[in-house]
Amino acid sequence: MASTAMPRRIRPRTFHRSDALLLTACAASSLALTWLIYFRLSPFSGAPGFVILWFAAFVLLYWLSVRELDGRLAANDKAVTALIAGVAATIIGVLAIILGYTIWRGLKAFHIGFFFHDLSSTGPRSIATSGGALHAIVGTLEEVLLAAVISVPLGVMTAVFLNEVGGPLRRPVRMFVDAMSGIPSIVAGLFIYVVFIVGLGLHFSGLMAALALSILMLPTVTRTSEVVLRLVPDGLREASLALGAPEWRTVLNVVLPTARTGIVTAVILGVARVIGETAPLIMTSFGASVMNSNPFHAPQASLPLFVWQLIQQPVAASIDRAWTGAFALILLVLILFVIARVIASRQNRGVRAPAFVDPEKE
């Protein structure tokens, strides 16, 4: 009686030593083959083209090898997994290079006084470690806070209308929000400049910058909040309505508390969308080299504008300060995100199930 070999069991999300050896062999052989074809047998040159061709050859060779061992189904699964992992690694690598280079350049002129002084006592001959960006940090915080105060309530209420209320205006409102998502940032700044500064005769200030930033922040908050509200189970709404609660109270006491963490995420994405914008600030807040803590009067500095103005100066010390300002902007974004996440996690732990009251027992 002929003995039949046991078939090899293949389970998703498993990675054994043989898989690692096969992956390494395919990577090494595709690298050698690509080097031979790219640099020796063809007139091409350059690292980007070589990397792209090598990765394509690696995926193809990996797919052929797995198909011979485990079949077409496993080959398709592992080849797509390798492709997605390679794209993700590329994105993470590019982001790491950008962050690493910014931090490396920013640390050259970094000092503790950078967060406690402005540029009032800094001149063209001053060293890179003189002065600071306190005025720009304060301006950024105030302008982003004002933009959030304007756009977050409007965005959340618009999302509630689109998801909970509806009606014949739902489609036009959604089209308008989608159209706002594609507005260039300089157009928002130009609109505020023409309407408020030129038309109404108002002055450059942090408030004008906040109005421009709120235009850019509003569609991000609205679309993200709408997606979050869709994830709230319909059973919660039905239970609240079945117990006699009106629709507005169901939204206020059931839907919004359930989606609180997601709404905080929407606010974070909105802040990330506008905190690094420079173009709308050029024609709204105008920038300053001294402290101005009043966003409603006179021009005001901000970190993106601080970096943009200093990087254009033909002085090495100013360029170093600009890189330090970019590093400070990264730190500021990181701190704001951590604070928002901590607040969201604490609120999420403190949320209890909605208390429904039977109207007949009242």
Image: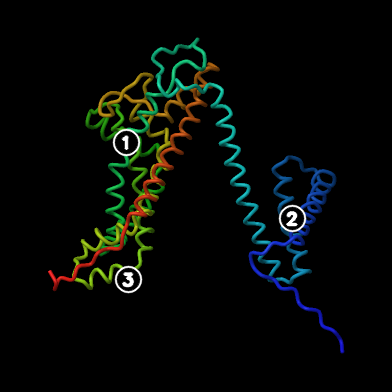
Residue 210, label in figure = 1
Q: Amino acid at mark 1?
A: Ala
- Mark 2 residue element: helix
The residue beneath circle 2 is 58
The residue beneath circle 3 is 235
Q: Disc 2 versus disc 1: distance between alpha carbons?
A: 49 Å
Looking at the image, residue 19 lies above or below residue 87: below
Q: Earlier in the sequence, mark 2 or mark 1?
A: 2
Q: Residue at x 23, y 67 (%)?
A: 356
Q: Earlier in the sequence, mark 2 or mark 3?
A: 2
Q: Nearer the viewer, mark 3 or mark 1?
A: 3
Q: Residues within 10 Å of mark 3 (few under 14, many from 20)?
A: few
- Mark 3 residue element: helix
Residue 141 in the figure: left or right of residue 325: left
Q: Disc 3 versus disc 1: distance between alpha carbons?
A: 39 Å
Looking at the image, residue 208 lies above or below residue 269: above
Q: Nearer the viewer, residue 264 or 298?
A: 264
In which quadrant is the N terminus drawn?
A: bottom right
Q: Earlier in the sequence, mark 3 or mark 1?
A: 1
- Mark 1 residue element: helix
Q: How is the image coloured?
A: rainbow
Q: Nearer the viewer, residue 8 or 310?
A: 8
Q: Amino acid at mark 3?
A: Gly
Q: Within the image, what quadrant is residue 294 found in?
A: top left
Residue 210: horizontal and vertical position, in percent?
32, 36
Q: Nearer the viewer, mark 2 or mark 3?
A: 3
